[in-house]
């Protein structure tokens, strides 16, 4: 039987560690500056006073994280909607697997919506590559985040994957805590959301029962996250362009930190979450497949099908599709004013200073157009019974 101490290297902090951790944070000038960027008008004294009163993880989330997220919602979005909460039992724990568009916000905004609707917040998977300063690790672990090891050797990867798989199983079924994890390593840069089979193979490492029984025990819930304006659309476009044009280009830790901050402060327009039905009934059908590779592919296809089906398409998505394909196929989905606004948004974000403007604009448009393409090509897997 596992306990928290078996996962000290990766687990979130618990209540007994809150006071000591906050003591470290409020002495860290970089954390104070970070907080003031997100809470303009808050003095250092105000931030220190608010955090010094926190004694538990729930208090930290309610008094700091939820307030921060609500500030982001109020100042950088035109509102957030969530559908599908009727698919969840508030007394049950789930493994939420979602598309991944923003480093911090995908899980943070989902947790706010769950919190506001009477559900417990999730634990959050976060890559070790993002923990570039000790204070960042402290902050995210206070916010119920657990660490996914990145940039390790093949031997280390096997060990860390087994530990991660065991922790997720432990959190779901012993701690009774829900989990959020992205469907892929890193954000999707081009708007084409796909579940990596390697993620599903990692999840099975902790199983000593059949494929069907194990994944039923995880209670997977596909989640579709859709931003009207991707908060880091320009940064993603420039990054993809540099990968094409600069040999050996690699992001730096500073780039990741900049993406985290920009994601929180940049405009997002409307944001929508759709909570899918827990995946269980189709697992027995998948179990009948002979090849394990077919099973993992089938499960990945099912998650993708549910996400693509539930993804909220905004006017911007249809505008981008028509622009990139030189068509007016979806002209009835948007107005000329909405098209002008989107073009002005792109012109503001992408300039010739970043490189070849035609290619950059094409990459930018793909971010918004690919979800439409995925919806158009949506094909229900043969074994799926739902409509």
Image: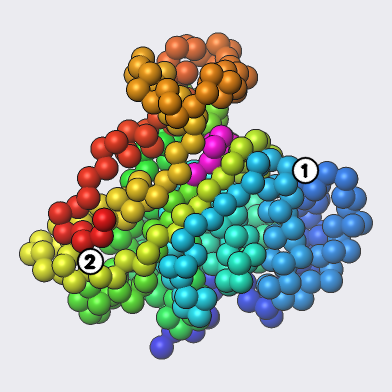
* Outermost front residue: 332
Instruction: Report the quarter where the C terminus lies.
Output: bottom left
Please, which colouring scheme is shown? rainbow
Q: Magenta residues, as a range? A: 226-231
**Residue 131 drawn at (x, y percent):** 58, 53
Q: Residue at x 58, y 20 (%)?
A: 337
Q: Residue at x 19, y 52 (%)?
A: 381
Does the magenta segment cover residue 147? no
* Closer mark to the observer between disc 2 and disc 1: 2
Q: Is residue 375 above or below residue 316?
A: below
**Residue 304 drawn at (x, y percent):** 31, 50
Q: Secondary structure at mark 2?
A: loop
Q: Main secondary structure of the magenta part?
A: loop
First-in-chain label (2 vs 1): 1
Q: Quadrant of residue 211?
A: bottom left
On screen, residue 122 versus residue 208, left or right, reads: right
The alpha-carbon separation of the residues under discs 2 and 1 comes to 46 Å
Q: Secondary structure at mark 1?
A: helix
**Residue 53 drawn at (x, y percent):** 84, 71
Which residue does the numbered mark 2 point to in the structure image?
282
Instruction: Report the quarter where the N terminus lies.
Output: bottom left
Which residue does the numbered mark 1 point to in the structure image?
37
For the residue pair 342 and 267, the one nearer the viewer reads as 342
């Amino acid at each position: 039987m596992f306990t928290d101490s078996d996962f000290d290297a990766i687990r979130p902090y618990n209540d007994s560690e809150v006071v000591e951790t906050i003591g470290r944070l409020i002495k860290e000038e970089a954390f104070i500056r970070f907080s003031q960027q997100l809470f303009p008008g808050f003095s250092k004294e105000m931030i220190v006073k608010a955090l010094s009163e926190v004694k538990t993880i729930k208090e930290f989330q309610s008094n700091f994280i939820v307030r921060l997220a609500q500030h982001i919602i109020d100042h950088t979005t035109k509102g957030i909607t969530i559908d599908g909460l009727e698919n969840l039992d508030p007394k049950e724990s789930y493994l939420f697997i979602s598309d991944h568009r923003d480093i911090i916000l995908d899980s943070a905004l989902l947790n706010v919506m769950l919190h506001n609707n009477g559900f417990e917040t999730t634990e959050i998977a976060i890559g070790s590559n993002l923990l570039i300063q000790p204070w960042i690790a402290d902050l995210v672990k206070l916010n119920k985040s657990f660490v996914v090891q990145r940039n390790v050797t093949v031997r280390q990867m096997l060990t860390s994957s087994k530990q991660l798989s065991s922790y997720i199983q432990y959190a779901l079924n012993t701690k009774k805590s829900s989990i959020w994890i992205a469907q892929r390593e890193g954000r999707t840069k081009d708007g084409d959301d796909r579940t990596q089979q390697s993620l599903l193979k990692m999840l099975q490492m902790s199983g000593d029962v059949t494929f069907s029984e194990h994944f039923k025990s995880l209670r997977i819930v596909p989640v579709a996250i859709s931003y009207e304006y991707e908060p880091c659309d320009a940064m993603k476009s420039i990054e993809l362009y540099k990968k094409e044009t600069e040999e050996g280009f690699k992001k730096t830790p500073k780039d990741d930190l900049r993406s985290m901050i920009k994601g929180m402060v940049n405009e997002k327009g409307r944001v929508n979450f759709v909570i899918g039905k827990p995946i269980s009934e189709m697992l027995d059908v998948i179990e009948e497949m002979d090849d394990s590779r077919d099973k993992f592919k089938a499960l990945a296809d099912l998650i993708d099908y549910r996400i693509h089906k539930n993804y909220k398409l905004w006017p911007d998505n249809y505008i981008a599709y028509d622009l990139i394909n030189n068509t007016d196929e979806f002209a009835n989905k948007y107005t000329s004013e909405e098209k002008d606004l989107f073009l002005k948004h792109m012109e503001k974000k992408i300039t010739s200073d970043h490189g070849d403007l035609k290619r950059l604009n094409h990459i930018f448009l793909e971010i918004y157009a690919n979800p439409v393409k995925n919806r158009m090509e949506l094909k229900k897997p043969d074994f799926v019974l739902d409509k």
